[in-house]
Image (spheres, helix red, strand yellow):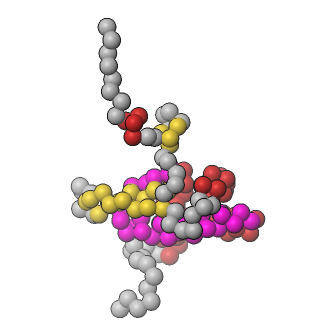
Amino acid sequence: MRHKMVSTTFGRSSAHRRAMLAQLVCCLIEEKRIETTLSRAKAARSLAEKMVTLARSGTLTARRRAIAILRRPPLVKALFEQIAPQCQDRSGGYTRIIKRGARQGDNAPVAILEWVSIAPVDKKKKKPVSKTDEKKPTTKVE
């Protein structure tokens, strides 16, 4: 029975599961948007929102707790300096999950996990991606 079970185990040991969720949150901090299975996105959202709540306090103790969970100090620094200030006016709900459909290989439900108030950054251009950049018509003048 599932009495008092908080989340799924993903068929992994507890250490492996914590490492997997920490890695997903680190990728979310770094990339601003990740695509994963729906159940992993739901589990990672919980951890990501807890990390933002820690980062909003900005104390040394909160920073040390975040480093203990995420295990990557440079990304914790980015969380505290870039993401938390943009979430100061929100009282929760820092992430959103967008369902994408099913994955082709195993028909697993896929979802996008992204920050609500932060635009994803295009690595080639080093600026936020906007919908107008993607739809610009290319005209060739000869």
Q: Residue at x 48, y 34 (%)?
A: 124
Q: In the shown orientation, is residue 109 left or right of residue 10?
A: left
Quarter containing the N terminus: bottom left
45 part of magenta stretch = yes
The reply to whether residue 64 is in sight is no
Q: Is residue 74 above or below residue 6?
A: above
Tell me which secondary structure the magenta stretch mostly adopts: helix
Q: In the shown orientation, is residue 65 left or right of residue 107?
A: right
In this view of the protein, which residue sits in the foreground, 90 or 40?
Answer: 90
Determine the residue located farthest toward the top in the rendered image.
142
125 part of magenta stretch = no
Q: Quarter of the image holding residue 136?
A: top left
Q: In the shown orientation, is residue 91 left or right of residue 105?
A: right
Quarter containing the C terminus: top left
Q: Residue at x 33, y 23 (%)?
A: 138
User: At which x and y percent is residue 94?
Assistant: 52, 62
The reply to whether residue 129 is in sight is yes
User: At which x and y percent is residue 44?
Assistant: 47, 66
Q: Is residue 122 above or below residue 6?
A: above
Determine the residue located farthest toward the right in the rendered image.
60
Q: Residue at x 42, y 69 (%)?
A: 42
In this view of the protein, which residue sits in the foreground, 36 or 17?
Answer: 36
User: At which x and y percent is residue 27?
Assistant: 51, 54
Q: In the shown orientation, is residue 121 left or right of residue 142?
A: right
Question: Number of callouts in the render?
Answer: 0
Span of residues in magenta: 31-59
In this view of the protein, which residue sits in the foreground, 114 or 47?
Answer: 114
Q: Residue at x 60, y 55 (%)?
A: 86
Q: Quarter of the image holding residue 113?
A: bottom left
Q: Is residue 25 above or below residue 121?
A: below
